[in-house]
């Protein structure tokens, strides 16, 4: 059996070939632009002069146009157009619930394939990508860079990471929203199995700081359909607690609650201008990703 080289486990050549013409393009105003594709409308104070605007109290006086003030008694600030590549951060959930699998691939493995492919696509188009792997705390934090060597480093970390402790999505989101200083693209890859209102507050924290947010909500098909039959023992993967039930008596109510859970995420993400993608692990990850990127490109 051929040995897979370190850093290659989650880069499927066949999947990458199907994604070859896809580009991940930030749709909203972020601090930069995707190389060769568009120039950011975000104005900073670097690179190239763009325009004037009226001075408002609190503006940095080093950009104050004293000549215009002396000439016509007008108070103006010089603005400059920033030209930097997109900076993205992938937040990957490695909590114990992500280890669940009913079809041969765990939610975590599927999430790793998504994260690896997204990192590959962005680095290929010369964007900077960082990664944070977390459960109830941050386990790995890799600063954003845009080199091939950096991609390999991230892939090696993915290969050496296993699911571990209990979920702590919301605290991690808040910590990262405060920790990521430059506006950019934040990609959350998780099963989102935590108190929903707290997770949504964490997502809104990123939006409040003017990041663009993309969520891949990773679910196993059995979590959606509840296909179990006969007397079945269910075990909480994070607490070990067990419950024996007859699934047929609970299936309808379970599916109703799961559908409501997903609809709530979809609704609040749409209202907050957050991209939400339901990632069913029974679907090929490259097809899921290709369909999403094609849709994103059409929306511009």
Image (cartoon, rainbow, N blue to C red):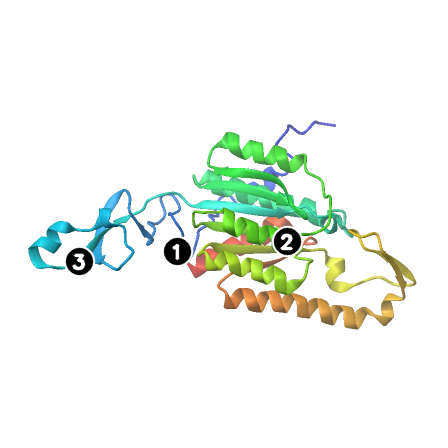
Q: Which numbered disc flags the more N-terminal residue, 3 or 1?
A: 1
Q: Could you say where residue 59 lies in the image, as x and y percent from the top left?
A: 28, 54
Mark 3, mark 2: which one is toward the viewer?
3
Q: Position of residue 294 (x, y in %)?
A: 49, 55
The residue tagged 2 is 169
Would you say 243 lies left or right of 211 here? Answer: right
* Residue underneath mark 3: 75
In percent of width and height, residue 80 lies at 26, 48
* Distance between the alpha carbons at the discs numbered 3 and 2: 46 Å
Nearer the N terminus, badge 2 or badge 1? 1
Of 119 and 22, the residue lying toward us: 119
**Furthest residue toward front:** 57
Secondary structure beneath dot 1 equals loop
Relative image position of residue 267 (x, y in whole percent):
57, 69
Quadrant in which residue 11 is drawn:
top right
Q: Write the residue at 58% across / 43% down.
A: 132
Secondary structure of residue under mark 2: helix
When the figure is inspected, residue 137 is found, relative to residue 3, above or below; the finding is below
Q: Nearer the viewer, mark 3 or mark 1?
A: 3
Position of the C terminus by quadrant: bottom left
Give the residue at x 27% y 50%.
60
Viewport quadrant of the N terminus: top right
Check disc 1 and report the residue beneath it. 29
Nearer to us in this view, 280 or 179? 179
Numbered circle sitting on residue 111? none
Q: CA distance from mark 2 to mark 1?
A: 26 Å
């Amino acid at each position: 059996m051929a040995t897979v080289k370190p850093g290659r486990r989650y880069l499927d050549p066949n999947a990458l070939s199907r994604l070859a013409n896809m580009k991940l393009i930030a749709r909203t105003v972020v601090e930069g632009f995707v190389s060769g594709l568009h120039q950011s409308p975000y104005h900073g104070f670097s690179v190239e002069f763009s325009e004037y605007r009226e001075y408002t109290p609190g503006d940095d006086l080093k950009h104050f146009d004293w000549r215009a003030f002396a000439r016509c008694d007008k108070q103006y600030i010089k603005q400059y157009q920033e030209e930097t590549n997109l900076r993205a951060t992938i937040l990957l959930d490695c909590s114990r619930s992500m280890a669940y699998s009913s079809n041969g691939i765990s939610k975590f493995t599927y999430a790793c394939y998504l994260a690896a492919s997204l990192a590959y696509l962005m680095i290929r188009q010369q964007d900077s990508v960082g990664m944070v792997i977390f459960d109830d705390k941050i386990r790995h934090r890799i600063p954003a860079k845009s080199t091939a060597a950096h991609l390999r480093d991230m892939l090696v970390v993915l290969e050496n990471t296993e699911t571990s402790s209990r979920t702590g999505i919301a605290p991690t989101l808040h910590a990262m929203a405060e920790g990521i200083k430059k506006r950019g693209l934040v990609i959350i890859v998780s099963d989102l199995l935590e108190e929903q209102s707290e997770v949504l507050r964490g997502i809104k924290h990123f939006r409040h700081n003017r990041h663009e947010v993309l969520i891949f909500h990773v679910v196993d098909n059995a979590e959606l359909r509840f296909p179990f039959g006969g007397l079945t023992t269910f075990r909480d993967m994070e607490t070990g607690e067990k419950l024996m039930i007859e699934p047929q008596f609970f299936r309808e109510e379970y599916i109703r609650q799961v559908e409501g859970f997903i609809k709530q995420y979809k609704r609040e993400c749409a209202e907050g201008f957050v991209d939400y993608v339901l990632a069913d692990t029974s679907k090929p990850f490259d097809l899921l990703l290709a369909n999403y990127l094609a849709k994103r490109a059409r929306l511009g």
